[in-house]
Amino acid sequence: MNIRRAMLAALTVLTAALACVVPGLPSASQPAPTVDTRLEIMVAETVSAALAQTQQSVPTPTLPPTSTSTPTATVSPTPETNSSASSLTKLDDGSTYFADSLVEFEITIPAGWLAVRINQQEYLDAWLLPELANPALQRSLGSIENLDPTELRLFVLDIQEGHTEIDFVTNINFYWDKSSDLSLENDEDLKAEAATLPQALPGLEVTATEISATSLGIPVGSITSKTPVTTLGGVNLEIFQKQVFVKVGEGVLIITLSTTEELKQATLSQFDAAIDTMAVGK
């Protein structure tokens, strides 16, 4: 398995295994875990180990902020910027504008979704939100704490009312594969990637692969899949995933939506609308 496919496999474990029945692992840094918390500990440790095998050094970013498109909404408050070479701006309509000068892209996340960068201020603040009284959201947010922020550039949780009543929390991951040479000139590379996914997650069924373009003319590849899982509470679910591949300044950005079949109709349209706001390049 090459570097790109190893990273895809790790990402699939992170987004899909949160609802699966798996053996639990104890953690010295946490109190005696319940059945649910053991699941999240195992997921975080598994993904961290997988990413460590493929991690490459990334130089200190010096790229200027991207500015190919500018949101017209008035922003409030001031964008939060830091050494991650990215910024989050909360817009007055409740959406969130994210600009990444390291990977060279920007996107607007719709209202009702919580966007965080690993261990940055908004990640710490998120733990104080009323929504985080929900244990499933706590576990999802905690699962990314030890991942590499130079690779997992943004993590987004669906906190819309009525969407967090099951053990699986709909989420979007923005994952940068700096070494990828995937081509979007045709669907050959995309189909090769799709063929590796069932190896990463047994039971996964790829339902479609497609090359298309956003309204701004940005080429994108997409892979959709579904996976039957059983929660630790014994509930049978079908997890729907859509992975979008975008060529960026260096490598490929992989944006993955993971949701349930019940929430697919509501969340997929929001995900697609967000992808359509993307701008790429300096």
Image (tube, grey):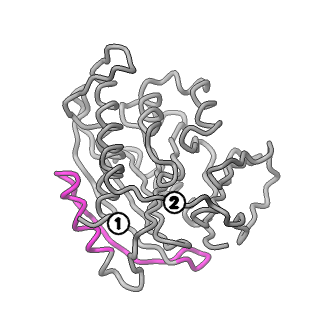
Q: Give the crowd class for mark 1: few <14, some 14-19, many >=20 residues within 10 Å.
A: many
Please tell me which residue lies in front, 236 or 189. 189
Judged left or right of residue 241, residue 121 is right
SS at mark 2 in the image: loop
Question: Residue 202: horizontal and vertical position, in percent?
Answer: 17, 51
In which quadrant will I find the N terminus?
bottom left
Q: Quadrant of residue 100?
A: bottom right
Tell me: residue 211, above or below residue 175: below
Please tell me whether mark 2 or mark 1 is closer to you in this view: 2
Instruction: Identify the residue at image location x=58%, y=41%.
Output: 114
Q: Which mark is residue 58?
A: 2
Q: Which mark is residue 49?
A: none
Instruction: Identify the residue at image location x=53%, y=54%.
Output: 270
Please tell me which residue lies in front, 246 or 150. 150
Please tell me which residue lies in front, 86 or 211. 86
Instruction: Identify the residue at image location x=32%, y=23%.
Output: 27
**Which range is magenta?**
190-218
Residue type at tag 2: Val
Marks 2 & 1, CB-CB < 8 Å contact: no
Judged from this view, the residue extending furthest toward the top is 32
In three-dimensional space, the C-alpha distance between marks 2 and 1, rounded to whole angstroms, equals 28 Å
Please tell me which residue lies in front, 214 or 41. 41
Judged from this view, the residue extending furthest toward the right is 74
Residue type at tag 1: Ile
Mark 1 highlights which residue?
223
